[in-house]
Amino acid sequence: MSSFPQRIFSGVQPTGNLHLGNYLGAIKRFVALQADFPCIYCVVDMHAITIPQDPKELRRQIREVTAAFLAVGIDPVKNIVFNQSQVHEHAELAWVLNCVARIGWLNRMTQFKEKAGKDRENASVGLYVYPNLMAADILVYRATHVPVGEDQKQHLELTRDVAQKFNNDFAESIAACGFGEAFFPLTEPLIAGPATRVMSLRDGSKKMSKSDASDYSRINLTDDADTIAQKFRKAKTDPEPLPGEAAGLEGRPEAENLVAIYAALVDGTVEDVLRDHGGAQFSAFKGALVDVAVSKLGPIAGEMRRLMADPGHIDAVLADGSRRASAIAHETMNAVKDIVGFVRS
Ligand code: AMP
Ligand code: TRP
């Protein structure tokens, strides 16, 4: 297998409120990676329309996710920050990958099954081929690593399968075009840390999600200090005090979730948190949790508000990022056209 220069890509959908799961599972980790690698962070608006969106609200949310990227400290000059629909090569490559991926592979995608629900016949075709668009997002930059939460693992496996099949199906042409043994890298997911799957505050068996009907199930990145305090105070727990060791969290999903959230917020481990708080009652631990959450999230919410007051600046960041992303994507797409056998001028 040829070696590919390391490059990070990740995407976040501009649908609903960004929450603590998005932050700890993904966006916070984007920031850490920018010190060591070239990174491309994308607001995936084309993924958003696989379910119906209000156009006005979509526009606002594209800007809000961008504001969140900037507010957490992603540098849009050193890295590329842009929205998907401004780089048409994502859709173009997705079409080619639609012709590489097999229907059987898509039929196994659990996210489609969850989102389509019982009325599968009535789901959009876009929702069904969503994973191929996600593979195109990543492969159009030939990205080697993708930081995501646990729920995206299966989509990353599909991305590898699609890349591998393209490399195999077109092996001869890839070599003839001068790309050696493989054109696409087999991208690695980066799923790590204590909070790869943050759970609902109301039900420790359900993931924290933008689409949960109850706002008490999640902490939104834009929540103020009082709301954060109230939501954590109302979070479901069990009657036992916190254990002294991680093994004691087994079978206690709500306790495990709150400890993992605390650990991720302070960049520590679950063991560290239990060393300091083992034996504490939830009333006391929740107080400590509110303090760290407010001290970490408060400044982000403030900065997001400041940025959202100047949408012109956000749009300029996206325009600049899109121009730079297009340059890379265009080069990949030309190579793909040559490999596949399209005629181009
Ligand atoms: P989405 O909001 O579906 O576009 O997700 C954006 C990123 O946040 C993806 O990397 C997801 O894996 C991650 N993510 C979403 N929900 C959670 C959660 N409850 N816990 C951890 N990561 C999550
Ligand atoms: N499917 C991802 C989610 O729902 C969002 C996404 C789209 C993505 N394209 C991507 C994530 C490419 C990582 C890389 O969270």
Image (cartoon, rainbow, N blue to C red):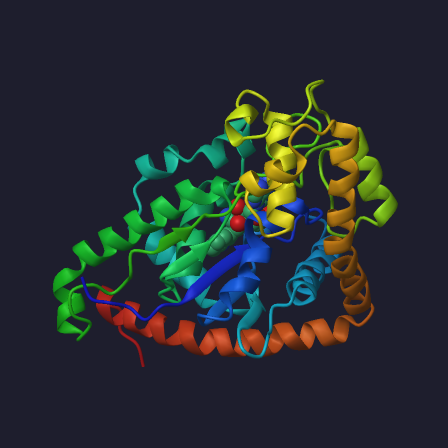
323 relative position to 242: left or right: left
Residue 145 occupies quadrant? bottom left
Point out the image quarter for the N terminus. bottom left
264 relative position to 164: left or right: right
| Above-or-below relation of 130 to 56 | above
Q: Is residue 49 among what the camera can see?
A: no
Name, please, the residue furthest toward the bottom: 345
Q: How many marks?
A: 0
Please provide percent x and percent y for residue 208. 64, 36
Please provide percent x and percent y for residue 82. 57, 68
Q: Nearer the viewer, residue 189 or 278?
A: 278
| Above-or-below relation of 123 to 9 | above
Point out the image quarter for the C terminus. bottom left
Q: Nearer the viewer, residue 251 or 54?
A: 251
309 relative position to 15: left or right: right
- At 35% from the left and 50% from the top, the residue drawn is 159
Name, please, the residue furthest toward the right: 226
Q: Nearer the viewer, residue 103 or 257?
A: 257
Q: Nearer the viewer, residue 109 or 334?
A: 109
62 relative position to 126: left or right: right
Q: Is residue 94 among what the camera can see?
A: yes
Residue 295 occupies quadrant? bottom right
- At 24% from the left and 64% from the top, the residue drawn is 340
- At 18% from the left and 67% from the top, the residue drawn is 174
Please provide percent x and percent y for residue 300. 74, 60
- At 50% from the left and 71% from the top, the residue drawn is 35
Please provide percent x and percent y for residue 274. 60, 36
